[in-house]
Amino acid sequence: MSRKWKRLALVPAALLGILVLALGGYVAYLQAQYYRIADNTPLEVDNPRQAQLTAGTPYTAVTCNLGFGAYGPEYSFFMDTGQMADGTPTRGQWGRARSREEVLAHTDAALDTLLTLDADLLLLQEVDENAHRSFRVNQRQKTTDAFAGYSHVWGENFHSAFLFYPFTDPHGDTVAGLQTLSRYRVDRAVRRSYPVDESFFVKFTDLDRCFTLLYLPVEGTARQLVLVHSHMSAYDEGGTVRARQLELLCDVIAREYEQGNYVIVGGDFNHALYGTAHAFESGQAFPGWVQTLDDADLPDHFAFVAADNGFAVPTCRGADLPYTPGGNYTTVVDGFLVSDNVQARAENIDTRFAFSDHNPVKLTFTLAA
């Protein structure tokens, strides 16, 4: 073989070496950037309010997953997979929102809906503060600006280095969290870390899942309302991680109840709630990610508040393909559970998934005297 051909034969090996070095460097970068927020981290209550809750007075709370402003009806997300009823596999397309204009439009539409609901307490998930996936739209700031008369408590639950996947539309770097807003006084707030899948590659892509506890005094009593804002894992085949998360959540709320407090838990449970796993017609096969939660899974003295229209209006649609009514798998994963010293009813708000892959849920509640 001539010297020229020998040199050419070395090119593939050199390219392979460069690729291996680049991949190794990228993995080292991800590892260097990776961390988990410590459990039991105190949270700041910004813009504190002074009015206190009173027993016997009706109040309202709303939970809503904003889907980082990406999920209009046309949107599908690359991590969501499924199959149609005939077995045809489905997978979402995009790694980030389709445009900054869509993020702004969807965020504004969500805020318009939430302002109309006029809730005393707001629990918002998938709120981006600084993220490639949402074109750097600061949804945290937009929510605090929209609800300027509320206290706000931020619990960070997604902080990632630049995720260069999918290659054609990378998800990028993200800082996001749970935003809780209150018209009433919050004495203190704490962030609790959920267990997550910490296997080597999964830990870089899963959220640093958490729930937050806000302690609201109740006038004329030593009791407090403990408002728990939760967002459980989604991409957990078989539900093993979610089972560990539920165990922690149940332990915490049971202890709070034993101390004499009122307890409300709201958010995105990422389980089909109170028997809604097969409640809605769909052109898709039953998804593998769906696990169920009902009252039997909760501690004594706790129950889910099944929405009055919970079997007519779903709160979550499959994002493995764009939304068509009756086409996507839908169920109820968003809502509230309460202790038995709280009287409550709920309503799922039908937005037809106009600005998110979730619908809001409104709770009307009274603290027992």
Image (spheres, rainbow, N blue to C red):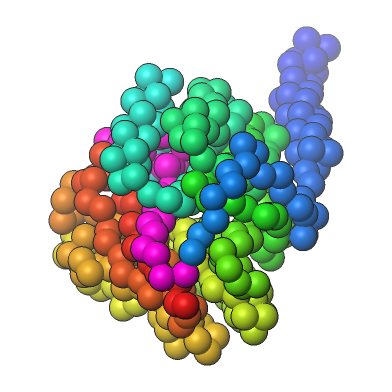
Q: State the image coordinates of residue 165 (x, y, percent, origin top left).
A: 57, 36
Taking 236 as reference, is 44 above or below it? Answer: above
Q: Is 276 included in the stretch rendered in magenta?
A: no
Q: Which residues are magenta?
A: 55-79
Q: Is 324 in front, or is 136?
A: 136
- When asked about the image quadrant of residue 285, the answer is bottom left
Residue at 39% from the left image edge and 59% from the top image edge: 59
Q: Is 76 included in the stretch rendered in magenta?
A: yes
Residue at 83% from the left image edge and 12% from the top image edge: 3
- When asked about the image quadrant of residue 347, the answer is bottom left
Q: Is 86 in front, or is 33?
A: 33
Q: Is 83 in front, or is 187?
A: 187
The quadrant of the image that shows the N terminus is top right
Q: State the image coordinates of residue 311 (x, y, percent, origin top left).
A: 21, 69
User: Is any part of residue 166 visible from this angle?
Assistant: no
Residue at 76% from the left image edge and 29% from the top image edge: 22
Residue at 58% from the left image edge and 68% from the top image edge: 220
User: Is any part of residue 300 visible from this angle?
Assistant: yes
Q: State the image coordinates of residue 296 (x, y, percent, origin top left).
A: 45, 88
Side (left or right) of 172 relative to 149: right
Side (left or right) of 350 relative to 161: left
Q: State the image coordinates of residue 204 (x, y, percent, origin top left).
A: 68, 47
